[in-house]
Amino acid sequence: MRVVELPIEVLSQSQQVNNPDLRVIIGKLDDLPLLSKFSDSFKGLSSGDLSRFIHVFWEHSAFSAGWVPYQGGCDTTVTFSGRSQVLLWEDGRGAMVKSPSCYVKGTKAWRKYGVSINQMHLEATLYSGEMFDENAAVIIPANAKHLPAIWAFVQSMDYQEAIRDIDEALKVTNKTLVKVPFDLPHWQKVAAEKYPNGLPKPHSDDPTQWLFNGHPKGSEQPLQVAVARLLGYRWPRQTGSSFPDCPALDPDGLEQYADTDGIVCLPPLHREQPAAARLRALLAAALGPFDERALLAATGAQKTTLEEWLRDEFFEQHCALFHQRPFIWHLWDGRKDGFHVLVNYHRLDHAALQTLTYSYLGDWIRQQEEDAKADQPGAAERLGAARLLQTELANILEGEPPCDLFIRWKPLQEQPLGWRPDLNDGVRLNIRPFLLARDVGKKGAGLLRAKPNIKWDKDRGREPQRDRTDYPWFWAETEPPTDFPGGKDFTGHRWNNVHYTLAAKRAARLHGAK
């Protein structure tokens, strides 16, 4: 092992006392005022129950029912990022604020402009006044005119090195973020050269950001956006939401290509064109002449036609892009030459699933029955696979375990009977019946074309005292079995992989009605 000899450095106690927060620092800080002279930093909100109160915006069809934009940490330094989440705020009078584990902080930063910094790795993005996450501290300048200089500084390696000179912790505190020397005239000059017309207006071509305009053209993911638009999804600014310096948008002309019921079959069914043909028409309207192979290659796809990509690669890419919370679901019967359908999760209520099960899939089954009678190759196998899929979808409609919905924060008498999802509960819980149905293809994927990385583990934190009759699962020390009546002691464990039969749910409703 090579030994490196370094000179001994003598530290002056009086010098260390003058350091920010009396920190012991090897080396010498620049003789400059600290960033804290020109700004303040704020810690963000802690919901106390992330799975319940914080979602990504595409889990909802629009900002409504108490959900508001919620800025989180970004994983790379970029002008506008960290804008994927929404918070169940309910005007500050809902269940989150009433929870003893919720801490509402950072209120002095709300409705102001500044910089958001990931406290783990110091990635930065601009902040525009929204509520924000506890892992993304916000720096607000005392003088708004200093924001360009501060933004230029925090993007630089100078800032990174200055922070690490005083704190090498994996996660630094929000106050540490402004305890570094700041050469205001220098960074004003840098900002003036980089932003001669001032800081840019809020904008993003990333479809995972609320600022995105919802159009395939110019998007970082035109094919994913086009599929979503074909299924009838629209981004927040297209549904009337606006953000600071980022207004709501008028219709863009692609609405006419959107499917009316959010159900698009890959093969031609129900008097509808196949999905790939409809997607090409939408892309032509959005992009003009386009190179299909180039669009596919840009996604990293191995396939060279939209038909193959939609069948084999779209859904897995969709899950990866949208943080494993897919809002377009690809259901199939397990055969490449079988039944494939894309559905808009936001529209997949009980009636829509019935239509899918008995009308769309019913049409496919009748086709296979006719082909089987005519001894068409593979028809009998396709028929068998389609009937199995129909059985599993019928099981989800009915809602007996393991195809039941379970929402841990709702009392037993309010648990859904059959497929009656509430979008406010999020994709994670509502997709469970489709993943726990009998696997038709990939192991653990149930009826889905690929398996999103979704688990129903016990969530962090504990519930306050709950009634055993209403919330028996909070009285379990280990993961509770089906129809668990509650144990002897209250634990408050946040179990999610819990099942109750229809009989148990109905009995609870009868008991609650007395």
Image (cartoon, rainbow, N blue to C red):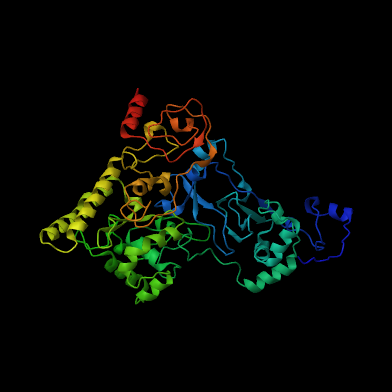
Q: Residue at coordinates 21% horizontally, 49% vertically from top-left?
A: 358
Q: Say above or below: 82 vs 400.
A: below
Q: Say above or below: 88 vs 476.
A: below
> In terms of depth relative to the viewer, which is nearer, 84 or 90?
84
> Residue 335 location, x and y as percent?
27, 59
Q: Quadrant of the N terminus?
A: bottom right
Describe residue 242's horizontal placement relative to residue 37 as left or right: left
Describe residue 144's horizontal placement relative to residue 221 as left or right: right
> In terms of depth relative to the viewer, which is nearer, 123 or 335?
335
Q: Residue at coordinates 53% horizontally, 58% vertically from top-left?
A: 244
Image mark count: 0
Residue 324, quarter of picture: bottom left
Q: Quadrant of the C terminus?
A: top left
> Residue 303 location, x and y as percent?
36, 70
Describe residue 140's horizontal placement relative to residue 98 as left or right: right
Kindly tell me whether residue 471 is visible in this rendering. no
> Residue 232 location, x and y as percent?
33, 58
Q: Say above or below: 216 vs 107.
A: below
Residue that protrudes farthest toward the front in the picture = 1
> Residue 490 location, x and y as percent?
51, 28
> In terms of depth relative to the viewer, which is nearer, 381 or 215?
381
Kindly tell me whether residue 86 is visible in this rendering. yes
Residue that protrudes farthest toward the top in the picture = 514
